[in-house]
Amino acid sequence: MVFENTNISQENEGATAREPRLLIDTIADDDKTSMASMTVIDQPVTNKRSKPETRTEIASLKAQDFQISVTVIEARQLSGTNMDPVCLVQVGEDRKYTTQKESTNCPYYNEVFVFDYTSSRQIFFDKILTLTVLHSRNLIRSGTLVGKFKIDLGTVYSHQDHGFFHKWAVLTDPSDLMTGPKGYLKVDVAVVGKGDNIKIPKINDENSDDIENNLLLPEGVQPERQRARFIFKIYQAEGLPKMNTSIAEKLKTVLQGEARDLVDPFVEISFCGQKGRTTVKKNCYEPCWNEQITFTELFPPLCKRIKIQIRDKDNLNNTVIGTTFIELDRISNAGDRGFLPTFGPSYVNMYGSPRIYTMVNELSDLNNGLGEGVAFRGRLLLALSVELVDVNSSDLQGSTDVEVENIPPLSELGAGRVEEFFLFGSFLEANMISPVIAEKSVTFEVSMGNYGNGIDGANVSHRSHRSNGDGDSDEDSLSEDDHTLLLRETATIDPNMRTTSPAAKPVTHDKYYYHMPFFEQKPCIYMTSYWHDHKRRLYNSNIIQKIMDKLDEGIQDVQEMIKTNEDRPDRRLRGVAEELINGCVAYSRLVKGTGGPAAGRSKLDRERHKMCLRDIDGIANEVRKLKKRLKMSTYKEKLSKMKTLLQKLKCFCEDPQHSIPDIFIWMLSGRRRVAYSRITARQILHSVCAEECGQHCGKIQTLFLKLPGKKRLGTHGWTIQAKLELYLWLGLAKNKRDYLNGLPTGYEVIRTGTGLYSPPMYLRYQDRQQYELRAHLYQGRGLIASDDSGLSDPFAKVIFSTHCDVTQVIDETLNPTWDQTLVIPNITLFGRAEELRDDPPMIIVEIFDRDTVGKDEFIGRAVAKPVVKMNNESYEPPRFPPKLDWFQTYRGSNKAGEILASFELLQIPYSQREMDDLLLSLWKEAKRKSLAGSYEIKMGIDLEESSKITESVKTDQGHKFIVPRGIRPILAKHRVEVLFWGLRDLKRVQLISVDRPRVDIEIAGRCISSSIIQNYKKNPNFSDPVKFIEDVDLPEIEYWCPPISITAVDCRAFGRTTLVGTHIISNISKFVFRSPDKSKIFTAACKAFSKGVAGLKNNGVATETTDVFVDIDHQSTLATDMQIDMIGFGGEEPKTKEEEDSALDETALDWWSKYFASVETLAEEKKKYEEDKIQDLFNEENDDGGMNNDGDVNTLISANADDVQKEKRFGKNFLKGAMGAVMQAKKNFAAPVRRLKKQKEQIDELKIFDTELENCSEFTNFTDLLHSFDLYRGKREEMADELSDQKRIVGTFKGAFRIYRYPLPVYVEQPDAQYGMFKGLPSNEPIHVMARVYIVRATDLHPTDPNGKADPYVVVSLGSNKNNDKENYISKQLNPIFGKAFDFEATFPQESVLTVQIFDWDLLSSDDLIGETKIDLENRFYSKHRPTCGLAEKYAIFGYNQWRDPQKPSQILHKLCKEMKVDGPHFSPGKVRVGKKIFTGPIELEDENGHKKPSDEHVALVALRHWEEIPKFGNKLVPEHVETRSLYSPEKPGIEQGRVELWVDMFPMDMPPPGPPVDISPRKPKSFQLRVIIWNTDDVVLQDDDFFTGDKASDIYVKGWLLGDDKQETDIHYRSLTGEGNFNWRFIFPFDYLIAEEKCVITKKESVFSWDETEFKIPPRLNLQVWDSDHFSADDFLGSLTLDLTRFPRGAKNSNRCTLNLASEEDESSDVPMVSLFKQRRIKGWWPFTAKSEQDELEITGKVEAEISLLTVEDAEKNPAGSGRDEPSPLEKPNRPDTSFVWFMNPLKSLRYLICARYKWLIIKIVIVVILLALLVLFIYSSPSWIMKKIVGA
């Protein structure tokens, strides 16, 4: 089936039922607008309502190509010590790692990762992008998490430009609830789909380094996100289908002895990359879980929706039963008075494939939520609440993992009260049934939930009560109502239900389509069902829906008025605003007081009630203000605002909490389901209040039945399976008496029972009316090619009710002019005539291609409504006659062309004479108005003398009625001038090359042929370029103009012609020349004269009012002088010595200086543009009283209102912006006032275009002379889109058209006799040109190597000339700088397409094409915008800005004036006059020696750069520029593979030769030497305990590096007891540096296996770390310091002043002055070492006194120095304390300082004691012998 939005309402207000009324609004406007402009039109003016567009949206089913690009730039403030961080980029299950950076907390990566996917949008956008930083990838610390960041791809894609650029992702640890961010990761993330064009902004690195203001968060998300618990409560499910075959059911019954339910359900919830699931309930159709699943995630989460699935547990694979999604933004409100996400308790309905189980389910994707479900699969009762985690809470408990736990069951009325609902329907008509289906009996089934589904509906549970799945029952938890509901729902046969129509075999009148034989007896269906009563949700949605429908209808009506050039669309828009205000007021009146407590009323119901009331009241107030300011000059701006309000209303319309399931209407052929339609319950819900009723409740609606799922893709889905005219009514059973009120009257009720109020079985219509349909089909345009020739043989088939008729076939065209009226008589319609007038049935117009062999091929389908004329009303304006209009046709989801038609339905009998008289009078009135003008008006057929309105014309296919006068377009004579320039890139036809082509142009039946190109290969241009088609009859109304058909044929031998290709120009308005109104010319002349008189009175001298003085030295002084570069309150900030000394040295400047200065300017312009947009929003919100002050001025100069309005808006915006900045500064007066932007050097710049040059609006695609029209051949593929359809292109026709009424008025310049309006046409003979192509660089190339890199090189070709730069490939770069210039000598037109290709060099395999771009040089060469050589900003004859065009500015100016026939140029000193414009500029020109001489080149260049200001002849000339072109690969069409920056110069060979090409070779990095002297450290953390003394001490040393692999260390200061260290140690780091890019350049091999060296660019960051040395274990990391040499805080003078502010990475956080070492060259001071504490807070762990100096290589050679303390220029040894030593290396010192110094007295005491003890021992030892001697007397 082709249509998705198949419910087409036939509202009681018919398309033309009421005439437009004019109301005078009584509200006085503040700007003294006239009362005429305050007129309100409150009814539709156009017939837009008769054109309901319907088509299939199959994006969710169709797989598409997507590309994810992630650039990991750098990380900052990572939590941890001494880490080797690595970043993991994960998309879904795909993972990629960056390289590992050693020993740093702020690694710099700059690595690109690309992921390619082919998937449907729904699956793709649900994927989670995870950025994870790990400590290391080594075996010891592998997988240690630092932090991670998650965001879904849908959020990225919905952001501006489909991505985030230079944003900081906040890294957090999911398992750590107590701490904050673990670091920041700077990334670029982009998601690109097929056909998307991404513009990556030029971002200033200084601005992007501000982390707080550049977080990777969507708009509206607060930077501080806290953790929250998302609590899902799963209660129960009901109505589940069986998930096994009937054979398995019987087998289980035999084996188990009892019948069991064939499903084992469980619930799975996917949220933010996590999954949680309930327990499995075995064998239960109605499981009851009562479980809670808890997720812990940052709030607000960066994923858009929650996925909820019911699955069936299976041993092999868990099968999905049903899927639903909950959008987070629909269940929460982020505003000031918003609320956290909340949901239910409420049932969610699940839909998917039909309920019957099959082993192979071809519609299984529907169960996963992919596409529209075609059957009810069950419903689930759940609730969601969110609790924010308080990290300061003392009872903080729980895990961050997914938790599942049991909860108590829901109360009896927790989900609401069960009510009885009654559904009634009547099939009034069923037609357009395919002949294949009509072979069997057809019946229609209506079901709601499981009610009414007789084939595969409710399954009777074999349990007597709801089971909890564990064998236990919870019968007590069920109420009596629930038991009743359960029993009634499972009943399959109910005598009080009738849900299917009687089976019957379709019949036909014409064998085109079949219809059901309902005739006067209309079958009815009815059913009673039981659902929880939440009708208030549906009522509120219905009220908003009606407001939306009215607003949408009004907006489309206004757009149609603009398209058809109707008068005063602002009046209609004023009426639309009035209707919107009335609707909002009605909503507030109806909804207030309904938000109180009730059974089943959830928190979300209450919050949505308050939110909708508040926001809709706000919309009403906003529209009131808008209505006051609505004028003719601003209506387009206000129309855009109304569209924004419409989108805002759509957010309120659908209630996220489901209630009553949708209704399905199935067409059954036998018992086989064929096609279906799905209707939401609220659309047909009844209410006693008319505003709350559904839009289709009690009304006849047209339904188109479609095939389910993917069956409707392709040719099968193009055919309508059936069209139903159906009446439906749904309401409470107590309101059952109203179900027949909306039916067309005149019926007789045939009831099934004897009861008076029993539902009817049939409705028998006695009243019937006879009608005649007249379908006026005038022409078609842009139809789809259906033949191999690229053409079609179209005819139209009109289907109305049960009748069908066809037009005649128009052979071989895509723009058929049928000019035929189809008359379908004797159409019988049932019902009251008055109601049919307002609700006529739909008309289907199908376009087919007639094939002589086989079946006619379908081209497209359009839907329309007829204008109905009853026999008792007059045939008179404004309803009659019906106006022709374009109806869009669709084939599937693709547009298939348009048809110009109108339709009228006439009740029989009618007066043909009355109709003819009206049509004749209208034609005569149009003729009279035409004769009053200066143009001749003519009808399509010469009927001037005939009184016939229409007549029958005989053709070779028979007779036909032409479209009658009064309806057919009124034609006027036009002249069509055709410029036949040439043909390009023609492919072979029938394996033979094209040699003698010719082009035929056809418009409005008139054809003209070009001359034959005699030899296409030698000269593909036509010899006779300009031809005319005289007296072409085209409609007066441009909207009705037919298309132009371009046909290229090859003239072969024997008079044969072969079709080459065709092109259709559907909209010819861009080629139409409109003569200016004579009255406007007179008004402009009077205005100019009055200004001249005013100037004479004021100055005493009459001056030319159009003179303009432009000074090159003082351009736009208003904007530059009034810029707020800095804000101060004590006078201007004095210039620093650096600024005074930084004189511009032009000898040091080159082309890259201009380039980088221009890049900076482009970034500033974009930043200013964003700020202006924000300021404009501020001004609009605060503009209520601002317009009143200018009311008098506007009335005085109303003739120039638009210009005054623009000037007024600019002045007001500027003043408000300036005052706002000053006021903001005053508020922050206490804070230090900082410079907002640095002083910019005055360098001549060029223009950088961030898109292709031809796509810039000011250059109009370079089609001012030549247009390129692609020629198509062959049949269009079934699922082809615009990109894939490019395969049919077989060549290009170059030419142009001029269409204008002829003859032209006498006051308009007459066309040339030979060239018409193509005056000054250049010769199209071959011309020799030298093309110079400059390839600057490429960015964001798609990686093609497995390592995620590429080795790009450039191949440039022009015709057969090719320059291959393969030898100079750049290794492993995705952003290479080429800096190449290529010269080509080419001949136009043979060699006019320049192709720039970028290949990836491969060592072994063939080189891969990364992407290519093509430039049409011929169109550029002949364009009046002169893109051959861009105009420089200033003229110079030497230096970096040397003039490169061989013609001087004065010569170019002379040539332009001569070609355009403009008076001038007239030079005088410092001035030049061109026409009536005067330009001024410098007088003198300086040469290389500094000598100055008079010159006119400066003022000539000023005139050229302002050439667009020359009246009538002026246009924007291309400046000196660099354009950015997207690269595409044929293998991945439509997906950008990168961008290349380039420009092209072209010089004719017959002119003086140009000078040498500009040198744009990449800058060579400049060599520097960084010297860092580590003098001292202080307050270093003492890490170790002394083994002998127990005192705190550290063995301090400092480690430093610049490029990563150049680490150096000081010697060790042992045993520092106070944290002080003395080193006097010098680090020397040589490096290469690019000054413009502020990057260090490293050239090295990535690994041992690398073939060649790779160039890396890293920022110049000096890394210093302080360590504690350990001898028997790993050294301890104490702290680090990172200094960006381009901007880092100035060091403190002493250690006491060294605070944590000096370690801050953002200068906005402190008032410490920042310095650049590349300017200051030498600095000395104290800086802090820092590390993160256990609480993850930054703290000082030491201080270092360092002297940093930067020298060039030349200066370093003049003043050499040694590393450490070595020669030359050695440093003195530090004066360290004596206690600094290693104890085991110095034992004597250890004895002295560790033992003696501390234990001296103890040692003395011990020695004395030892001596005394020794003496005592000796005494004791010697005393016996002494005693014995004494005894014996020895």
Image (spheres, grey):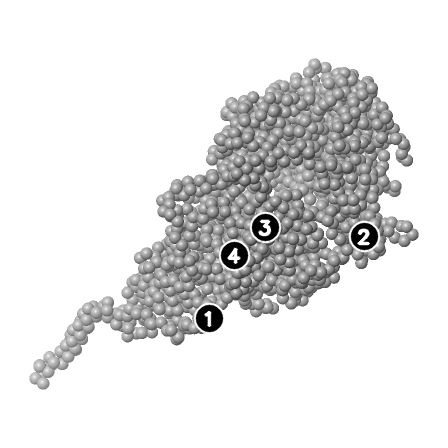
Question: What secondary structure is marked by label 2?
Answer: loop
Foreground label between 3 and 1: 3
Q: Earlier in the sequence, mark 2 or mark 3?
A: 2
| Marks 3/4: CA–CA distance | 25 Å
Please state which of the two labelled residues, at mark 3 or mark 4, is closer to the viewer: 3
Using the numbered discs, state the Cα–Cα distance from disc 1 to disc 2 in whole angstroms: 66 Å
Is label 2 or label 3 in front?
3
Say few, some or many: other residues with alpha carbon within 10 Å of mark 4 (under 14 / 14 to 19 / 20 or more). some
Q: Residue at x 72, y 45 (%)?
A: 1281
**Could you say which quadrant of the image residue 1448 lies in?**
bottom right
> Label 3 sits on what residue type?
Val
Residue 1472's label in the rendered image is 3
Asked if one can make out residue 200 in the rendered structure from this viewpoint, the answer is no
Identified by mark 4, the residue type is Ile
The disc at residue 1243 is: 4
Which numbered disc flags the more N-terminal residue, 3 or 4? Answer: 4
Amino acid under label 1? Glu
Indicate left or right for 304 with 259 as reference: left
Camera sees residue 1106: yes
Dividing the image into 4 quarters, which one contains the N terminus? top right
